[in-house]
Image (cartoon, helix red, strand yellow):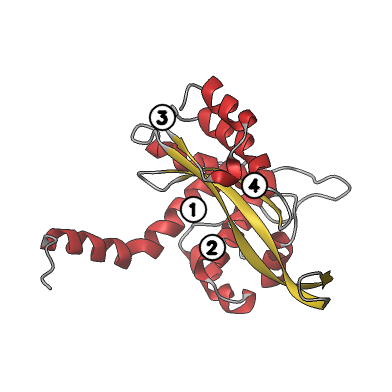
Amino acid sequence: MKNLEPSSTWSAYNAAQSEEKTRFVALLADLCNTVPQPSRLPGAGRLRLPLSDMLFAAAYKLYVGFSSRRFTCDLHDAYANGLIDTKPHFNSVSRYLSDPAPTDTLKYLVALSSLPLKAVESDFAVDSSGFSTSRFVRGYSKKHGKVKDNREWVKVHLMCGVNTKTVTSVEVSGWTAHDTNYFVPLVERTAGNFQLGDVLADKAYLSRKNFKAVEELGSR
């Protein structure tokens, strides 16, 4: 079967894929540098590592997908290129990844990263997805009549643009959380930055409360 797409489309695709990592780290550094550096944490002394550097390191590690030790050379390259001001130890990166304190800041950065597409995005969709962890939980299964060990997982709830796929708001919860409870906060935060057109969701979000919230925000 012939490829009917113009060759220029593939040229742009190849160029984007070939330059993705270089552009990603530059954009990530600019985004993280918008975060002010707190002088202290509650009950702790002065911070020795810039918060912007640690947010960059945490996001970059997940993007690369390497272990903390193998990721060290990527951090050193970022430091050499002036993207971060320090070279954090891999143990420091792991500690920040397990610390819930920067959660609100990370959610703010997700929303901030979507703003360049404000002029071209008006239709949005809400959904959730699960991420497994390295921890296991034990519970009794009524269906199978026995105790079972299951891998613990968390859910991410997000709203994204239908056309651009940009994520405009995000929440993280435990695996037992019901999706519908996160609909209104996601829509309200998105409406604070975007003009809402259509808001799409599956039946898991079907409720009078959610319909009313969308209607009051001027969407449909």
Where's residue 154, x and y in %?
68, 60
Residue that mark 3 sits on = 197
Where's residue 190, x and y in %?
52, 34
Q: Secondary structure at mark 1?
A: helix
Q: Secondary structure at mark 3?
A: loop
Report the amino acid beneath label 3. Answer: Gly
The picture quadrant where one finds residue 132 is: bottom right
Residue count near mark 3 (Cα–Cα under 10 Å), binned few <14, some 14–19, many ≥20: some
Report the amino acid beneath label 4. Answer: Asp
Marks 2 and 3 close (CB-CB < 8 Å): no
69 relative to 6 in the view: left or right: right
Image depth: mark 2 or mark 3 in front = 3
Where's residue 149, x and y in %?
78, 77
Image depth: mark 4 or mark 1 in front = 4
Residue that mark 2 sits on = 60
Q: Looking at the image, is 145 positioned above or below residue 202?
A: below
Mark found first going from the N terminus, 4 or 1? 1
**What residue lies at 50% left-to-right and 52% top-to-bottom?**
29
Mark found first going from the N terminus, 2 or 3? 2
Q: Secondary structure at mark 4?
A: helix
**What residue lies at 70% left-to-right and 49% top-to-bottom?**
102
